[in-house]
Amino acid sequence: EVQLLESGGGLVQPGESLRLSCAASGFTFSSYDMSWVRQAPGKGLEWVSSFSGGGDGAHYADPLKGRFTISRDNSKNTMYLQMNSLRVEDTAAYYCAKPKYCDRSGCSGGFDRWGQGTLVTVSP
Amino acid sequence: QSVLTQPPSVSGAPGQRVTISCTGSRSNIGAGYDVHWYQQLPGTAPKLLIYANNFRPSGVPDRFSGSKSGTSASLAITGLQAGDEADYYCQSFDSSLSGSVFGGGTKLTVL
């Protein structure tokens, strides 16, 4: 069974840093691009970042470039999101998400598995 | 301001049919990228409802269907049930942003 388990969220002050983790199981982790999606309280879904399965390509939502860094350790089946210079507006539940299909030509089919989310609260 | 535009809310009586629109542009839906739909019940993670415009994952009832045309897509729900009350999101890929984009979400109320 595919499982995604996020951790690392918490309460921090503006300007501080956090590192989120997403531990994956039940599928060949290295074969899938993985993504972070966040949801501010009472708001919609916002794509944050994606990292290719082979570890050779990272993409970020434009507003987050320079502050957030995505990485993965395929030997540990784990993806990370390093968040620096956190702002109040970064307060959200952060989900890791797996695409439905991935092959040599890329990934498709939407995100068919999501973690339960980890809450990040940035408050003075 | 979301890249994909959805109505904030829709409603319908039990048994009725509702549709939720998702309007994009030439850099996402209009460029031929697939549209996916998610259902999010309160307090839970999103669930993939429709993928690749009109395919249902295993376990999703055929009351849910998707379509796509031009720069827009739609989700249709027939035979509305109380359990369908949720937020619904569309998602695609945007070539100018080099990443996934979501609609702002639509809250479905079953009257």
Image (cartoon, helix red, strand yellow):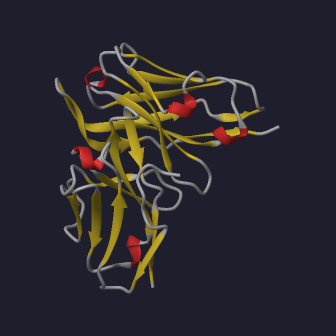
Q: Is residue A92 left or right of residue B13?
A: right
Q: Is residue B63 above or below residue B60?
A: below
Q: Image quarter for residue B61?
A: bottom left
Q: Nearer the viewer, residue B4 or B105?
A: B4
Quadrant occupied by the N terminus of chain A? top left
Image position, residue A81 (x, y; %)? 53, 25
Image position, residue B20 (x, y; %)? 35, 68
Quadrant occupied by the C terminus of chain A? top right
Q: Nearer the viewer, residue A81 or A25?
A: A81
Q: Is residue B106 above or below residue A52?
A: below
Q: Nearer the viewer, residue A24 or A66?
A: A66
Q: Nearer the viewer, residue B61 or A1?
A: B61
- Residue at the image point whose x is 61% and y is 23% from the top: A67
Q: Is residue A38 above or below residue B36?
A: above
Q: Is residue B32 above or below residue A36?
A: below
Image position, residue A34 (x, y; %)? 37, 29
- Residue at the image point whose x is 35% and y is 85% from the top: B14
Image position, residue B51 (x, y; %)? 24, 51
Q: How many marks?
A: 0
Q: Is residue A22 left or right of residue B56?
A: right
Q: Is residue A47 left or right of residue B30?
A: right
Residue B71 visible at all = yes
Q: Image quarter for residue B19?
A: bottom left
Residue A112 visible at all = no
Q: Is residue A47 left or right of residue B37?
A: right
Q: Residue furthest right?
A: A124
Q: Residue furthest front?
A: B26
